[in-house]
Image (cartoon, grey):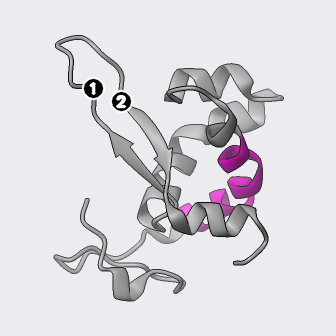
Amino acid sequence: MPIDTKTLGTQTPETTDGRKYPSYLHAFERYDEELLAKIKQLERPTLNKLALEAPDAKTRSAISPWLSSAEWRGLIKRVEAQEMVGKRRYELTPRAEKKLSGHS
């Protein structure tokens, strides 16, 4: 999903083809600090690895929509497996590193 970098940091990021950040994803932004930190500490983080690290069922159920929200906001990027059988993993972007260090 190619994000229009000019819209990052706004309440309504957009894709390069004009799609807007879905409003329901705002509710998942509260998980940023916790889940970005988990991605940073995990080796080759995947959705399943994040779920195993979740402290409770509420956080675990929020992981999938949070990943979507964080990707829309340019905080993480997907890395597709190169092998025939593999899992999608996630990496922090420089924006996420900046957010984690307290320099929103």
Q: Which mark is residue 81?
A: 1
Q: Label 1 sits on what residue type?
A: Ala
User: Of helix, strand and loop, which mostly describes the magenta segment?
Assistant: helix
> Which residue is painted at 44% across and 57% down in the image?
71
User: Could you tell me which quadrant the N terminus lies in?
Assistant: bottom left
Is the Cβ of the residue at disc 1 closer than 8 Å to that at disc 2? yes
> Is 84 part of what is drawn in magenta?
no
Q: From the viewer's perspective, tell me whether residue 74 is left or right of residue 5.
A: right
Q: Residue at x 79, y 71 (%)?
A: 102
Q: Position of residue 82 (x, y in %)?
A: 21, 25
Give the residue type at disc 2: Arg
Q: Mark 1 vs mark 2: which is more N-terminal?
A: 1
Magenta part of the chain: 24-37
Indicate the position of residue 27 as horizontal and vertical percent values: 66, 62
The residue that disc 2 covers is 88
Residue 100 to residue 103: above or below: above
